[in-house]
Image: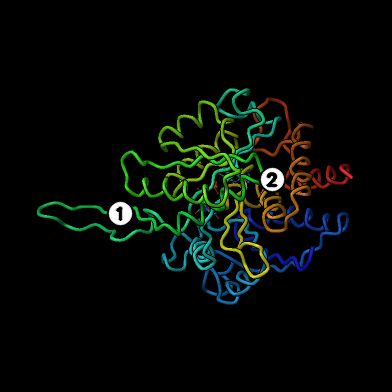
Amino acid sequence: MSNASLLILPGDGIGPEVMTEVRKVIDWYGARRGLTFDVSEDLVGGAAYDAHGTPLTDATMAKAQEVDAVLLGAVGGPKYDVLDFSVKPERGLLRLRKEMDLYANLRPAQCFDALADFSSLKADVVGGLDIMIIRELTSGVYFGEPRGIHTEGNERVGINTQRYTESEIARVARSAFELARKRGNKVCSMEKANVMESGVLWREVVTEVHAAEYPDVELSHMYADAGAMQLTRWPKQFDVIVTDNLFGDLLSDLAAMLTGSLGMLPSASLGAPMANGRPKALYEPVHGSAPDIAGTGKANPIACILSFAMALRYSFDQGDEATRLEEAVNSVLADGLRTADLLGQEGVAPVSTAEMGDAIVAKLDASL
Ligand code: NAD
């Protein structure tokens, strides 16, 4: 692997704690698999505000633009709630996403067998589930103009605009088709073409991109409301789902919860390919900084470790090694190891953040 550079931004709360465990995994790949990363570490969020008065310095932003992948822990905490909106910890994360133009948000919903009983759905509905939701992240109704609240006659009107250009739809559709080729080769595109013009255009453009560039991938279309029903009825019918920013926001959270705890959920946000062919990329767990358990050793490091597995697969083309890491996680869970957030059964003592990280590394060792 040539010149694989990684910027680590642990952030706040449990971010640094879970990232310590990811560092063990990264070190293992260097020592045992010859996958060496040029790793640098910097501040983001409240930690950056404390040191520099801003949640992301220009220097850190510039570094993020140069590296192959950014791995982020979490940002935020009650200490920073009083800050002005412009310097809140979350602004650091938003700036990264915006300036790196990360338009494809990958949210896997994967159910590890050992946790099938943890879901609110029946074990046979979620057991072995492995789907990927791609949410368009930089356009749509959260960004469209006009927007705002104004007065018309004697009442106020709230306005947001759903707006998508053909190129915005085409690029995220390509992300979905490319990804499907590395997985089950199926894409389901979701919109509301029955009631929204932006949905009609979405469906047309996805169909065009498919016909011109990806005819080998199986494509289907579904209205997003029907998609929500199908996700809870029989989620295993899907492989890759591609959808807009608003529907993706809802559907990815719905799909994620099929599989249990926040402490298990990784994500990736990808942008356009750089000169070396690798996409701009930010990997982060879905969870926040969990101030309620920060510093107690209770945090589950698996979401962050699985985010690194996504980096192996999508930034560094190391799909087999990503699978090795996911299998190590599965194996640790199958042995019954649980951090506190995964406890359901009486009489099982939880392991700490560090113990979970060490156990995963031991499974990696055992995989050789
Ligand atoms: P949260 O995700 O931090 O926590 C929600 C609940 O889940 C808490 O009870 C927490 O203890 C638990 N939890 C989360 N991750 C866990 C893990 N890895 N292991 C075990 N338990 C875990 O969400 P919140 O409490 O709404 O927000 C806390 C702070 O995090 C806020 O400042 C918020 O703005 C910020 N936040 C940041 C991000 C991010 O960095 N991407 C995302 C969401 C929230």
- Ligand 1 is within 8 Å of the C-beta of the residue at disc 2: yes
Residue 287 appears anywhere in the view: no
| 52 is higher (above) or lower (below) than 240 | below
Query: Which amino acid lies under the numbered mark 1 shown in the image of this protein?
Result: Asn
| 59 is higher (above) or lower (below) than 353 | below
What percent of the width, then of the height, locates residue 223? 41, 37
Q: If the image is split into quadrants, where does the C terminus sit?
A: top right
At horizontal 55% and vertical 70% (from top left) the residue drawn is 56
Q: If the image is split into quadrants, where does the N terminus sit?
A: bottom right
Camera-nearest residue between 235 and 239: 239
User: Which residue is tagged 2?
Assistant: 302
Query: Which amino acid lies under the numbered mark 2 shown in the image of this protein?
Result: Ile
What percent of the width, then of the height, locates residue 230? 49, 29
> Residue 160: which disc?
1
Name the residue at the bottom extreme: 59
Q: CA distance from mark 1 to mark 2?
A: 37 Å
